[in-house]
């Protein structure tokens, strides 16, 4: 998986998070950047790519709100 593809996926998730949860891109960037999603994306990008950006945005929001998967 290329670094470009990983960066694009991260950016899609940030944009989806901002849109779905009504926050600005800067806030979404911080939330996504502090989530377990980034570790998963870096360690197993193929797994991450099996799901769309909205799935990950919702999962990150669940993490922020204390829901466990």
Image: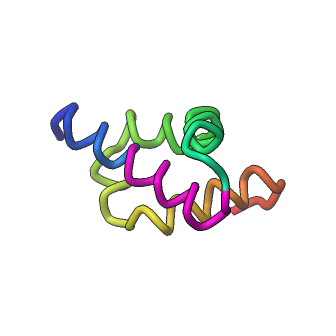
Instruction: Residue at 36% x, 43% y: name it.
Output: 44
Instruction: Residue at 32% x, 64% y: name it.
Output: 50
Instruction: Residue at 46% x, 54% y: name it.
Output: 15
Magenta region includes residue 18: yes
Q: Is residue 20 left or right of residue 52?
A: right
Q: Which quadrant is the C terminus positioned in? A: bottom right
| Residue found at the very far right of the displayed protein | 66
Dominant secondary structure (helix, strand or loop) of the stretch shown in magenta: helix
Q: Position of residue 1 (x, y in %)?
A: 18, 40
Q: Within the image, what quadrant is residue 57 found in?
A: bottom right
- Nearer to the camera, 49 or 9: 9
Instruction: Residue at 47% x, 42% y: name it.
Output: 40
Magenta residues, start to end: 11-22
User: How is this picture coloured?
Assistant: rainbow
Q: Position of residue 47 (x, y in %)?
A: 35, 55
- Image: 61 above or below 28: below
């Amino acid at each position: 998986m290329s670094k470009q593809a990983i960066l694009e996926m991260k950016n899609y998730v940030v944009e989806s998070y901002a849109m779905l949860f009504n926050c600005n891109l800067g806030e979404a960037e911080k939330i996504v950047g502090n989530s377990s999603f980034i570790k998963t994306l870096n360690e197993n990008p193929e797994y991450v790519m099996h799901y769309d950006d909205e799935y990950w945005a919702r999962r990150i929001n669940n993490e922020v709100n204390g829901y466990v998967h």
